[in-house]
Amino acid sequence: MQTDLQQQLEQRTRINNFLMRAALPIGLYFIFEYMLTVWSAGNIFMGMLRLPFLLGTPILLYISMRKLRDNVMGGTIGWFRAWLFGLQMMLFAALVEAAWIYLYNEFIAPENLYEMQSAAIAQYEESAAMLAQSSQMQSVLRPFNEAVEALKEAPVPTAIEAAVQMVSNDLFIGILLMIPISLLIQRKTNTTE
């Protein structure tokens, strides 16, 4: 009885260690994506450069979850456990990213959040001007202008608010991404001998 309990605890420890080690490169990847977002605030080319990097998150998650299944779980994992472990990995990665976002926006570039909000307002105003020129888009123009005005009136988020928001975003994306990834990763044991 004691050995079964010890084996379960050792297995859980191996899983948690693997998830934290696998989450670190994903968190560093998220930091790189965030910095591309910061640099692309006023630059269309950098914004286009950032788009292919969005595909990297599901690929990194798939590779990490496959390594978890094959190297730590003995080649078998159910859908729910894969989904849950993937979500745990996304949480660890999001915490790494949140720490960087807080440090960056609080100490390195405190004006960054204001500049990003100003750049977003400028882009929306430019889009509103293009919509105003189109006769077919007049029905969209009023709600669009109201959204621009709401963004102008919104306060600039603090560094901690930006970090918490990014954790929420990453967890939501993780919930959605892990559904198909878990379906691809799941593998049951063969019970017939």
Image (spheres, rainbow, N blue to C red):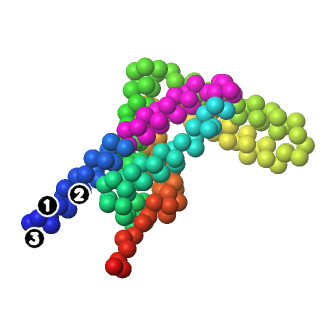
Look at the numbered disc 3 and give the secondary structure of its residue: loop
What is the number of the mark on residue 6?
A: 1
Element type where label 2 sits in the image: helix
Tag count: 3
Residue 29 image position (x, y, % from top left): 47, 36
Q: Is residue 169 left or right of residue 10?
A: right
Name the residue furthest bottom: 192
User: To which residue does mark 2 refer?
Assistant: 11
What amino acid does circle 1 point to? Gln
Residue named by callout 3? 1
- Asked whether 24 falls inside the magenta stretch, the response is yes
Above or below residue 106? Residue 96 is below
Which stretch did the figure color magenta? 23-47
* Amino acid, disc 2: Gln
- Is residue 160 visible in the rendered structure shown here? no
Mark found first going from the N terminus, 1 or 3: 3
Would you say 186 lies left or right of 40 here?
Answer: left
Q: Which mark is drawn over residue 143?
A: none
Residue neighbourhood size for the residue with mark 2, other residues' Cα within 10 Å, grouped as few (<14), some (14–19), many (≥20)? some
Q: Where 7 sits versus 48, above or below?
A: below
- Mark 1 residue element: helix
In-front residue for pair 128/77:
77
What is the quadrant of the C terminus in the image?
A: bottom left
Residue at the image point whose x is 47% and y is 51% from the top: 62
Q: Is residue 70 visible?
A: yes
Measure the alpha-carbon separation of dots 3 and 2.
16 Å
Q: Any magenta on residue 22?
A: no
For marks 3 and 2, the one nearer the N-term is: 3
Kind of residue sitting beneath label 3? Met
**Tag 1–tag 2 contact (CB < 8 Å):** no
Per the picture, the main secondary structure of the magenta-coloured stretch is helix
